[in-house]
Amino acid sequence: MKQLTILGSTGSIGCSTLDVVRHNPEHFRVIALVAGKNVSRMVEQCLEFSPRYAVMDDDASAHLLNASLKQLGSQTEVLSGQQAACEMAALDEVDQVMAAIVGAAGLLPTLAAIRAGKTILLANKESLVTCGRLFMDAVKRSKAQLLPVDSEHNAIFQSMPQPIQHNLGYADLEQNGVMSVLLTGSGGPFRETPLHELASMTPDQACRHPNWSMGRKISVDSATMMNKGLEYIEARWLFNASARQMEVLIHPQSVIHSMVRYQDGSVLAQLGEPDMRTPIAHTMAWPNRVTSGVKPLDFCKLSALTFSAPDYQRYPCLKLAMEAFEQGQAATTALNAANEVVVAAFLAEEIRFTDIADLNLAVLEQMDLEEPQSVDDVLRVDAIAREVARKQVMRLAS
């Protein structure tokens, strides 16, 4: 039986992870749950899964959780703060750590799991977008096993030969017969919107993703294809891929989640329903398989599968992310931070949809930063970029 810590248990990925546990109680046991401030959901999770530990982000939330659990007769020990989260990620009895805390808050606990040599089920984008070299170096030193949860990276992982799976970030693609990685994306809700109409698109329109059910921020990132840009950055680190070994394709149906092109002309693809429980169950059970609760893909009900190259006029954020990778980690960190601020401003209707890419570019052009050598350096770049982005938003909105 595999023993599990879930970082970000009350979020979307965390809840889906627990659903896989629910379907496979004989295979998985939850040791620790770590969350932000959602006390009511954490109470439900503790009562159902009886973890040994539960960690909340702050003392006030932990106090509320502890009082509720005691009243209900739960034996779960309640802790709070980032240090406690890091300790849960490194517990001796834990085999796997689901790293699903969103944003910079997830960096240190994920790094703690890596340094402890755990199997890390990686769902935190920032780990590789902002700390790619730091994280991959730590993985190599500790001999931790990284397993990507993001549907695209998981699809690529499943389509890779075993030597690459066991040496992520360092295996040579060419020596293993791989020609390129094909990263697919739906193109979002504005794939066919005339370019001159993009400026007038509203937050609600941007959040109507045609295939996936997602939060508002990531829905906007899908509309701009910044999400694919961030995934491109992650894939470069995870699979040790050069720019010429990467291809990005628009695939509106979201049935093929990504592919790997081989030197002999073969292309291996992973297909499935657009449901995050599939990649989650894959990483949890790897190298075996368990039930995920996802319905089988019905090929007879599929429409045609279509593909096209991305138009960078329509998706300037995608191009921006690709270029940022070539500039280094300071640039990718700054871009990620700026984008969070700028997308929040768009969702608050302070700027137009087309301003997102313009402001992201303005932040990158304004910043001149040294390459980060530590997580503290990364957080410093992140903070500076956010401040620059906020000023750019205020300038535009005034």
Image (cartoon, rainbow, N blue to C red):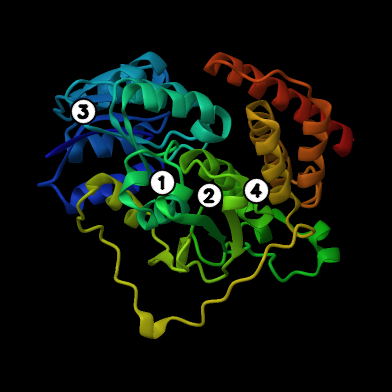
| Disc number lying in front (2 or 3) | 3
Q: Earlier in the sequence, mark 1 or mark 4?
A: 1
Q: Amino acid at mark 3?
A: Val
> In the rendering, at what x and y percent does residue 30 appear?
20, 35
Q: Which mark is residue 226?
A: 4
Question: Label 2: which residue?
Answer: 215
Mark 1–mark 4 Cα distance, whole angstroms, equals 20 Å
Do the numbered discs 4 and 3 sit on residues whose CB atoms are within 8 Å? no
Q: Secondary structure at mark 1?
A: helix
Mark 1–mark 3 Cα distance, whole angstroms, equals 22 Å
Question: Label 1: which residue?
Answer: 12
Which of 296 and 374 lies nearest the eye of the viewer? 374
Which quadrant is home to the C terminus?
top right
Q: Earlier in the sequence, mark 1 or mark 2?
A: 1
Do the numbered discs 2 and 3 sit on residues whose CB atoms are within 8 Å? no
Q: Which mark is residue 30?
A: none
Q: Secondary structure at mark 2?
A: loop
Residue 136 versus residue 234 in the image, above or below: above
Mark 2–mark 3 Cα distance, whole angstroms, equals 30 Å
| Disc number lying in front (2 or 4) | 4
> In the rendering, at what x and y percent does residue 96 appear?
26, 34
Q: Secondary structure at mark 3?
A: loop
Question: Label 3: which residue?
Answer: 94
Residue 236, picture quadrant: top right
> In the rendering, at what x and y percent does residue 282 appear?
29, 52
Which class describes the residues within 10 Å of circle 4: few (<14), some (14-19), or many (20+)? many
Tell me which residue sits at (76%, 45%) in the image: 356
> In the rendering, at what x and y percent does residue 59 appear?
39, 15
Which class describes the residues within 10 Å of circle 3: few (<14), some (14-19), or many (20+)? many
| Disc number lying in front (1 or 4) | 4
Do the numbered discs 1 and 2 sit on residues whose CB atoms are within 8 Å? yes
